[in-house]
Image (cartoon, rainbow, N blue to C red):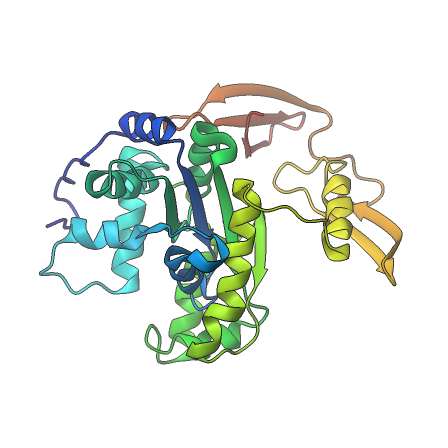
Amino acid sequence: MATADSPLTAPSLGASEVIEILRGNQAYVIGFTGPFGSGCSTAAHLLSKGDSALGHPPFIKMTLSDVLRKLAGPQRQLSRHVLQDLGNRLREQEGTHALAARALAEVLSSTPDAKNVALDGIRNIGEIRWLRDQLGDRFALFAVSVGSAETRFKRRRDVSQTWPDFYELDLRDQGESTEYGQQVGLCVDLADVLIVNDEELQNWQLNDKLGTKVRDYAALIQGRAHRWATQDELMMNIAYGASHGSKCIKRQVGAIIARDGEPLAHGYNENPNGLAPCIEGSRLAFATSSDGNGSRSWLLEADDAHTARGQYQPS
């Protein structure tokens, strides 16, 4: 049983062994992220069911929080706060990729020939970077979003009975200041597919509506299906292209204004007029990060002796 200071039990497989087996299996891993109450876990569950009539294979679903519950032991009552603390501790001690690696090790321990895995509950960008670095285009990240926090609160009254409790948990979940903490907001930004789940659906509607979306996107990712891009997707690709013009260290955001499917203008985030971009006029030095996941960090030393830190993902 893991307590605040007890040693963590070793995983059944090391991270390098996990990757070697997945590559040998030519497996696909689809990760799911999103704030709690968004329907992220429901989407992963629906993907796991598959649909043989339409040629969609089932996926083996593993939730990262289940790995934490196993580490904590059956005797403990686990609140969301406790799970967050344990996950942070694991990432701090073993690297930001550790929870994802342990979850995949659990899958492979029970199903060594696994070819399709749905990894639910990704909450740290180190997990995403490690999976992308190690699996390439055989990993994709799906984010599930809901426009209103009030809607998510109503959906997850089992987690928080009051709005202040929900707000506190949600704020921590969306983004902590430490590199090994909860970073759902940043994870959503890094998603390959964004699925909007604002509509209130009855249980009998979930499979046909949300499930169909998730399975169809998985088929595109795996090359099992092909279609032309929608008009919204074309516009978003223009916005994504514009984002590459930003010289912001922390985040690059593109935007487009369109009318009746025709683009009118596009742009990207930058400092106000009169202020040089953050990255200009600074000395840049690279250093390998200590979490062992293959990503790198950068250190910017500005001319006025102030320093700023950011993340760099090698292409």
Q: Is residue 92 left or right of residue 163?
A: left
Picture coordinates of residue 186, whole percent (x, y): 53, 48
Q: Residue at x 10, y 50 (%)?
A: 1
71 lies left or right of 188: left
Position of residue 214 in the picture relative to residue 247 (left or right) = left
* Image coords of residue 274 (percent x, y): 84, 40
The quarter of the picture where the C terminus appears is: top right
Q: For residue 131, what is the image quadrant?
A: top left
Q: Nearer the viewer, residue 313 or 262?
A: 262
- Camera-side residue: 14 or 290? 14
Q: Relative to residue 283, is residue 274 drawn left or right?
A: right
Residue 173, position in %: x, y?
42, 58
The percent position of residue 19, horizontal first and vertical second, equals: 34, 29
Position above or below: 279 against 194: above
**Is residue 299 visible in this depiction of the protein?**
yes
Q: Which quarter of the figure has residue 197?
A: bottom right
Residue 51 seen in the figure: no
Please name the residue shown 34% across and 41% down the image: 100
Identify the residue shown where x is 43% and y is 25%. Answer: 294
Q: Closest to the observer: 128 or 45?
A: 45
Q: Residue at x 41, y 67 (%)?
A: 168
